[in-house]
Image: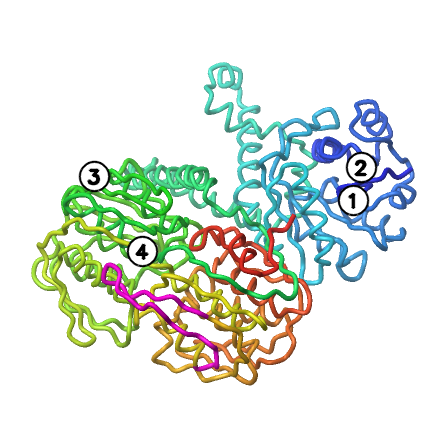
Amino acid sequence: MKKQNDNALASSVLVIGLGLIGSSFALALKRASADRLIIGYDRQRATMKEAKALGVVDYCQPSLPEAVAQADVIFLSVPMLGMEPVFEQLAQCDLSGKVITDAGSCKGALVSAARSVFGEVPDNLVPGHPIAGSEQSGVKAGRADLFFAHHVILTPLRQTNPQAVTLVQQLWESCGAHVNFMGVDHHDQVLALTSHLPHFIAFSLMDSLVGDKESHDVFRYAAGGFRDFTRIAGSNPVMWHDVAISNKAAVLTSLDMFSAGLAELRSAIENSNSQTLLETFERARKGREHFASLLTRKHAMAGKKDELAVLVTRPGGVLAGEVRVPGDKSISHRAVMLGALAQGTTVVDGFLEGEDALATLAAFKALGVDIQGPEQGRVTIKGVGMRGLKKPEGSLYLGNAGTAMRLMAGLMAPQAFDVTLTGDESLSNRPMGRVTQPLADMGAMIATEDKGTPPLRITGGQSLKGIHYNLPMASAQVQSCLLLAGMYARGQTSVTTPGIVRDHTQRMLRGFGYQVDVDGQVVSLHGGGTLKATAIDVPADVSSAAFFMVAASIAEGSDITLTHVGINPTRAGVVDILRLMGADITLSDERLVGGEPVADIRVKSAPLKGIDIPHELVPVAIDEFPALLVAAACAEGKTVLTGAKELRVKESDRIQAMADGLRILGVDAEPLPDGMIVNGGNPIGGGTVDSFGDHRIAMAFAVAGLRATGGVRILDAENIGTSFPGFVALAAQVGMRIAEEG
């Protein structure tokens, strides 16, 4: 009875459980492909009969073993406590060549049930959870568009078959869903807070009110807010009973957290504690603003983002041609900041249209600066002067841009108004004490979370004084933050660094006419100066070029030229390190553009050898180490990296992320507290690696695919657009065998 299917997806799908989710999945698949056979199974024969009559499925099979025999994919859409009994029935069937997936909201319970029945979790089981639903239930509630533009979270395990994951992802994407990936435990913790807790609060509130003798008037005069909040209490009681039991630990933790907060609020009301009440409500209001700005920012970035969930590479590939990578991110950030504070109009060419730089641009627009563009890399900034910024209406959302947040902390601290700097989940976990502590010494008032992480709540109207600060570790971001704050401070501000750091800020300050003094490792300036508008031509980002330098070095027969690349000596450590490893790299047409040194870089393939990376080169190649560790994996012998502890607190823990991914691909990689030992020269295998949402990790493993013996799948690659919009297209253009999955 199987129908043929021409779109390379499963030709027959069995839906077990024909409630809202199961029937909606069936309808969505039928709409996506008329040639796919949809089989229905439900414990209730009446439900199966109704599903067939409504056209939800092509036919229903009352015998589960016979239904399984007909299917390529088995989709479980039953209450959580019903999963184990279904697994017990499936265990009696021949499941070879079939893929099993589900829609349960508790992945830990699903995995435990599978392990209990099968002994170990089958490699053809792909746990999944669509973040979509309705207070309606039953087969009649099914909608073909229920999942359109909604997220679906897949939580594959280490042993899960990558082909099974790909198939399930493609099925969901054919329903119009956006597919994301998470770990099992993380999924259950997140869902307990964002979905389960709100439902249980709504159920509890409605249950309390129904038993109130005044409930008639309560419901009669309830406004829209009450209606919207309690809508979800109309959801299926059986399903939510199972959720409560299945995800008990995470649900109890979320309920305890909420109960503690509610108790504090009750106490504040009972004691007429106005300060606590106002602080609680203000935190909540700002949190809601942050959430709203995140959604707004996500919508605004939709046209710029690479929209990549998974990257896939095929073995082999030869790089050739001439290419210019996007503009330097560090310089793009600073150009917007100083241009906004200058007198006159600044024109920036070569501006990086990546998410991080665009976040900075959006923030200064919110601060009242007239900014036009970017259009083909050109941005026009009408400066407002040193004291011309305006209080923004809400928080300033900086996405994933750590550079922007740390530098803007220095610029916002001396302003006359209060402002809050927020970021995405990754940025919200990154340490900010390295800038807030010295800024406090200057007189700034900045509040953070308990662990010194964002959001940064900056109190305006403070008078700053200049200080001398000895950096405990080399950091251009901290140095730049203090210099930018120093422009507003009384007296001199000076910063001493223990090693080489990027000097983009002092170069650009001079370009805008602000005097900066450099004496060895000490950089200083006096407050009270002004900035004058100028023209800026942003060089190509050496950090982005690094991926192609490594790629051309390790792919036999490659010969590529990267044009107009910034080779600032405080940034170009990647060139020196690759040359020490034996790379064939030549620089030509070296010149100064707007005070920044640039050159064309030609790279030809060459046999690499392992080295002990010199300590003095570590800080000037800190962002390039994900790519350099791939070079080490391809080099003959041992490469040792130490003195790079800062990699632990980037967008991800880059040491652990690279070590984990390299090991999955069969590379001998040993993480160290401040670096890594890589024993290279052996074949690199294929496999699925997680980039943890880190753009540089994702691009590094894309490069590793050139030397892999099998395909490499790179999960969670959406954030490539933060620094390198168009990476996939450009990489494919020069010869890498890379694409977006699906």
Q: CA distance from mark 1 to mark 2?
A: 7 Å
Q: Residue at x 45, y 76 (%)?
A: 578
Query: Which sits earlier in the primary sequence, circle 1 or circle 2?
Result: 1
Query: Which sits earlier in the primary sequence, circle 1 or circle 3?
Result: 1
Q: Is residue 338 left or right of residue 186?
A: left
Q: Is residue 168 left or right of residue 276?
A: right
Position of residue 47 relative to residue 630, above or below, is above
- Residue pointed to by mark 2: 36
Q: Quadrant of the N terminus?
A: top right
Q: Magenta part of the protein: which range?
A: 580-602
Q: Is residue 399 left or right of residue 127?
A: left
Which three-letter amino acid code belongs to the residue tagged 3?
Lys
- Residue pointed to by mark 4: 538
**Local secondary structure at mark 3:** loop
Q: CA distance from mark 3 to mark 2?
A: 58 Å
Q: CA distance from mark 4 to mark 3?
A: 27 Å
Say which of marks 2 and 4 sits in front: 4
Image position, residue 33 (x, y; %): 75, 34
Coloration of the structure image:
rainbow
In-front residue for pair 455/251? 455
- Residue pointed to by mark 1: 10
Image position, residue 732 (x, y; %): 56, 56
Q: Residue at x 68, y 37 (%)?
A: 239
**Local secondary structure at mark 2:** loop
**Local secondary structure at mark 4:** loop
Which three-letter amino acid code belongs to the residue tagged 2?
Arg
Q: Residue at x 39, y 64 (%)?
A: 542
Say which of marks 4 and 1 sits in front: 4
**Local secondary structure at mark 1:** loop
